């Protein structure tokens, strides 16, 4: 697919705090620190031409982080959602609950949910659908394990995960979905993919979405992020690639200055 519409794909950098900084005071302090760092750098998302920024704290930190981000232009996201609207499901969090806590975004299908908690493609699809129905904007994660990569199955795995997640959705849903390519072997390991390889997968994701949904123009606007040991030192390489529109950041998002430097790399990528 030709490089259509990159200039109109706004960069997005999302912070996944995972099971860290979840106490209300911790979440409030980190969110406030990120806000200050971005404002000092002139990167606050409320200004025209700046990257979109989403912070995803643990559920217990959502409300406090949201207070710290009020009227800042930074968005609040959750790390997961249950595919059911309500009921006797101990420990589950519904899309409606997330909206009530102030979240506008939600991560769906992260590899840690797939591998540690046994979520299959069908579960991810249901979560994506319920998030969209509730008005949440999902960040859909796809990516292969080390074994799958070594077997040359990267494209097949990503294609399977993407096809399953988008099943039943119309082309219009692509306006609200962001895809994050996160090779499992690079998450939390300090080992990152090469920008050229990640960019090739990002381009393939748009091609596949266009083919399945019969909507090339809509697919050209689909934002694809890279995630997997992203940090300030390597962010420019990934975010400078024409097919990569931002980053889903794990450990580096727990340090406000480090995370702000990644946002700066996204701002510098050009159109």
Image: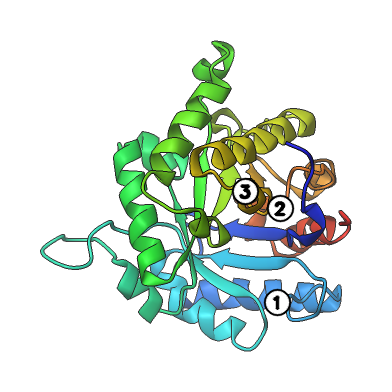
Q: Position of residue 39 (x, y in %)?
A: 80, 79
Marks 3 and 1 close (CB-CB < 8 Å): no
Name the outermost residue toward the left.
Answer: 88
Q: Nearer the viewer, mark 3 or mark 1?
A: 3
Q: Give the residue number, with chain letter if any, for mark 3.
A: 219
Q: Quadrant of residue 53?
A: bottom right
119 left or right of 32 in image: left
Q: Mark 1: few, some, or many residues within 10 Å (few <14, many ≥20)?
A: many
Name which residue lies at 52% across and 80% down.
66
Q: Earlier in the sequence, mark 2 or mark 3?
A: 3
Specify the quadrant that holds the C terminus: bottom right
Q: Nearer the viewer, mark 2 or mark 3?
A: 3
Secondary structure beneath dot 2 equals strand
The answer to whether residue 238 is above or below residue 61 is above
Q: Give the residue number, with chain letter if any, for mark 2.
A: 246
Q: Position of residue 249 (x, y in %)?
A: 63, 51
Q: CA distance from mark 2 to mark 3?
A: 16 Å
Secondary structure beneath dot 3 equals helix
Secondary structure beneath dot 1 equals helix
Is 269 or 64 nearer to us in this picture?
A: 269
Q: Nearer the viewer, mark 1 or mark 2?
A: 2
Q: CA distance from mark 3 to mark 1?
A: 32 Å
Coloring scheme used = rainbow
Q: Give the residue number, with chain letter if any, for mark 1.
A: 35
Is 168 or 28 nearer to us in this picture?
A: 168
Specify the quadrant that holds the N terminus: top right
Q: CA distance from mark 1 to mark 2?
A: 18 Å
Q: Position of residue 188 (x, y in %)?
A: 58, 38
């Amino acid at each position: 697919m030709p490089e259509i519409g990159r200039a109109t794909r706004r960069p997005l950098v999302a912070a996944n705090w995972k099971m860290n900084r979840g106490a209300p005071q911790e979440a409030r302090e980190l969110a406030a620190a990120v806000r200050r760092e971005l404002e000092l750098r002139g990167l606050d998302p409320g200004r025209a031409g700046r990257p979109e920024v989403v912070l995803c704290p643990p559920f217990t930190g959502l409300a406090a982080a949201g207070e710290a981000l009020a009227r800042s232009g930074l968005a609040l996201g959750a790390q997961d959602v249950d595919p059911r609207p309500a009921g006797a499901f101990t420990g589950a969090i519904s899309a409606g609950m997330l909206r009530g806590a102030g979240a506008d975004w939600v991560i769906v299908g992260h590899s840690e949910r797939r591998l540690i908690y046994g979520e299959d493609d069908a579960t991810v699809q249901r979560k994506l659908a319920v998030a969209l129905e509730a008005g949440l904007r999902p960040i859909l994660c796809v990516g292969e394990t080390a074994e799958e990569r070594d077997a040359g199955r990267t494209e097949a795995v990503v294609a399977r995960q993407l096809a399953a997640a988008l099943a039943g959705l119309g082309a219009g849903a692509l306006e609200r979905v962001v895809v994050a390519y996160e090779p499992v072997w690079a998450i939390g390991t300090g080992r990152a993919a090469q920008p050229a390889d990640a960019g090739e997968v990002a381009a393939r994701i748009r091609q596949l979405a266009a083919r399945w949904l019969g909507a090339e123009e809509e697919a050209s606007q689909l934002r694809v992020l890279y995630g997997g040991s992203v940090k300030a030192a390597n962010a420019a390489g990934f975010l400078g690639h024409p097919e990569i529109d931002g980053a889903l950041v794990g450990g580096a998002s727990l340090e406000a200055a480090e995370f702000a430097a990644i946002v700066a790399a996204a701002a510098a990528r050009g159109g």
